[in-house]
Amino acid sequence: MTHTTSNDEFGEVIEENYQRVYNVIYRLIGQEHEAEDLTQDTFVNAYRAWDQFRGDSQVYTWLYRIAVNLTKNRLERWGRRRQAHSFSLDEPIAYDQDDSQPREVEDWSRNPELIATNQELGDVVAAQVNQLRLEYKEVIVLRDYEQLPYQEIADILGCSLQAVKSRLFRARSILRESLAEYLNACP
């Protein structure tokens, strides 16, 4: 099944998938501006190829594959130009938070100490994920952040189901080891 390009139809595809695609790219590349550019490039490439989409997979799986490939290419170009950018644990990570709605029930998790501890842990984990080799970072982002099924991850990355499971096991082992000292120091 092939699609003819309809602006309205593709507009819906963008609307339904933009944030998810952006999130994957951002988690892989770690820079807002680059993630925005690559997200736009993803949808431009998808629009150009829309009439060739056969429907063998879900649309978002196809989009993720385009996004991951574009991100890999950008990271490879950066690698040829300079050393990989490392992130300081002191560098803030942007989170979208909308606390404009009043809460009717007191939320004990709003404890400032708990929030700070959770944010610190999130920052430490994100920094460690960012240090992983791309093949490990991809599976962590797609499985643990995006919560995609293993088969969809295999389709996106163009590898076997067993390869996905193996990479994920190895990535989690590396993270467990790199976070052990930090987690043991927490009360």
Image (tube, grey):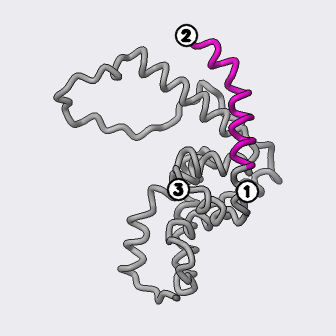
Q: Looking at the image, is 108 positioned above or below residue 158?
A: above
Q: CA distance from mark 2 to mark 1?
A: 37 Å
- Residue 113 x/y as whole percent: 42, 14
Residue nearer the viewer, 174 or 22:
174
Is the stretch drawn in magenta largely helix, strand or loop?
A: helix
- Residue 75 x/y as whole percent: 72, 54
**Which residue is depicted at the point 57% across and 85% down?**
52
Q: Is residue 115 left or right of residue 120?
A: left
- Determine which quarter of the picture holds residue 124: top right
**Quarter holding the C terminus?**
top right
Q: Which residue is mark 2?
A: 187
Name the outermost residue toward the front.
Answer: 162
**Three-letter amino acid code of the residue under disc 2:** Pro
- Residue 61 x/y as whole percent: 55, 66
Residue nearer the viewer, 28 or 173:
173
Report the number of numbered marks.
3
> Which contiguous range is marked in magenta?
166-187
**Three-letter amino acid code of the residue under disc 1:** Gln
Report the mark closest to the observer, 2 or 1.
1
Answer whether labels 3 and 2 touch (C-beta < 8 Å). Answer: no
Q: Which mark is residue 36?
A: 3
**Which residue is depicted at the point 55% across and 73% down?**
57
Q: Which residue is mark 1?
A: 162
Report the mark closest to the observer, 1 or 3.
1
Q: Residue 138 colored magenta?
A: no
Q: Looking at the image, is 73 positioned above or below residue 185?
A: below
Q: Which mark is residue 124?
A: none
**Which residue is depicted at the point 69% across and 29% down?**
176
